[in-house]
Image: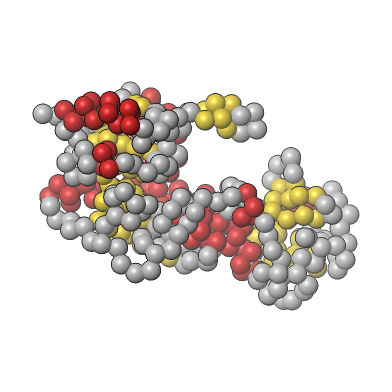
């Protein structure tokens, strides 16, 4: 009887894991990804990033609307069971798998999660680790159960968070390290040298971000706003209002000093703003409907009065 892997994944984060499995010569029996969705300003229907890879490599592919649909499960089980899959590998698929699917692979379904569980369970662990000012994060492989990131831990690897990291750069870093951990996990599972361990310690949660989560409160400290900016880039992006103009704040740095929260204290060649604790220098900014620009470019097209105008 044949054996191999069912791969569940959707966004760019999942690509290194799928490619690592292919490069290692693993047999991919089936790729499961989310349906094509409208993206961008034009709302053009686009395939998921994992669908693109599956098509590129000629892998069997399905895109169920509802993974928990009884008819879908009823039809899927007779198809998968004769293939005798060893593993289900789940990387940012975006939906909770039902018990009937979790039980099909020989070794169960293994999930790669972008945090050191039980910290930051949920849909946006990378973003919230940055927003909360964590200095260390990591990746975890776990044996899935029916909960949300609650299954027993297989392997973990710590990864330091650098000040220059934002959600985009940290996601790329963790996706590559996570792919290596997936390969190590399946190798050790086959050799029987991993003992799944129940999660211990305080669980924290990382829910999907909403647009309003990017709203800057200038009564926060400069460090807290700095963390919000990098944790919400590239989506939904931190934002504020200046003279009724909505602007996204893309990149900042923390400075020593004091000024009223939101008050622009320097606006010649640089843009420095007061907070409840410390100053914040804005390095990159994006006015609504325009491209990302440097603070100097932003200032040159506007009349901004130092010590008078404020972000709100």
> Residue at coordinates 34% horizontally, 52% vertically from top-left?
147
> Residue at coordinates 18% horizontally, 31% vertically from top-left?
81
Q: Quadrant of residue 20?
A: top left
- Looking at the rendered image, the quarter that the C terminus falls into is bottom right
Is 47 on the left-hand or right-hand side of 38?
Answer: left
> Residue at coordinates 21% horizontally, 27% vertically from top-left?
78
Q: Position of residue 73 (x, y in %)?
A: 30, 31
State the count of labels. 0
Residue found at the very far front of the displayed protein: 70
Q: Position of residue 189 (x, y in %)?
A: 17, 49
Say whether residue 24 is visible.
Answer: no
* Most foreground residue, 217 or 77: 77
Q: Position of residue 96 (x, y in %)?
A: 37, 44
Q: How was the colour assigned to the protein in this rendering?
A: secondary structure
Residue 58 position (above or below residue 203): above
Q: Position of residue 23 (x, y in %)?
A: 28, 36
Residue 5 position (above or below residue 210): above
* Most foreground residue, 304 or 239: 239
Residue 125 position (above or below residue 45): below
Say whether residue 305 is visible.
Answer: yes
Is 208 on the left-hand or right-hand side of 175?
Answer: right
* Most foreground residue, 209 or 171: 209
- Looking at the rendered image, the quarter that the N terminus falls into is top left
> Residue at coordinates 62% horizontally, 63% vertically from top-left?
226
């Amino acid at each position: 009887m044949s054996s191999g892997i069912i791969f569940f994944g959707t966004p760019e984060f999942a690509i290194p894991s799928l490619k690592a499995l292919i490069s290692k010569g693993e047999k991919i029996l089936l790729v499961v990804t989310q349906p094509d969705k409208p993206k961008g300003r034009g709302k053009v229907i686009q395939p998921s990033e994992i669908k693109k890879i599956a098509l590129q490599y000629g892998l069997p592919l399905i895109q169920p609307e509802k993974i928990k649909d009884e008819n879908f499960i009823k039809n899927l089980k007779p198809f998968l069971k004769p293939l005798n899959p060893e593993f289900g590998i789940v990387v940012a698929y975006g939906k909770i798998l039902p018990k009937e699917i979790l039980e099909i692979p020989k070794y169960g379904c293994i999930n790669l999660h972008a945090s050191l569980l039980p910290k930051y369970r949920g849909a946006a662990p990378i973003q919230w680790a940055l927003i909360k000012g964590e200095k260390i994060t990591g990746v975890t492989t776990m044996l899935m159960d029916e909960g949300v990131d609650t299954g027993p831990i297989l392997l973990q690897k710590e990864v330091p968070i650098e000040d220059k990291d934002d959600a985009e750069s940290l996601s790329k870093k963790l996706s590559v390290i996570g792919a290596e951990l997936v390969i190590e996990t399946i190798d050790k599972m086959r050799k029987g040298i991993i003992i799944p361990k129940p999660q211990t310690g305080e669980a924290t949660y990382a829910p999907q971000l909403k647009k309003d989560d990017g709203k800057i409160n200038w009564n926060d400290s400069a460090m807290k706003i700095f963390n919000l900016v990098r944790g919400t880039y590239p989506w939904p992006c931190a934002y504020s209002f200046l003279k009724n103009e909505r602007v996204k704040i893309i990149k900042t740095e923390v400075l020593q000093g004091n000024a009223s929260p939101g008050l622009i204290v320097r606006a010649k060649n640089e843009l420095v703003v007061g907070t409840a604790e410390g100053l914040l220098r804005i390095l990159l900014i994006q006015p609504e409907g325009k491209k990302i620009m440097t603070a100097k470019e932003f200032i040159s097209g506007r009349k901004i009065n130092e010590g008078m105008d404020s972000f709100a």
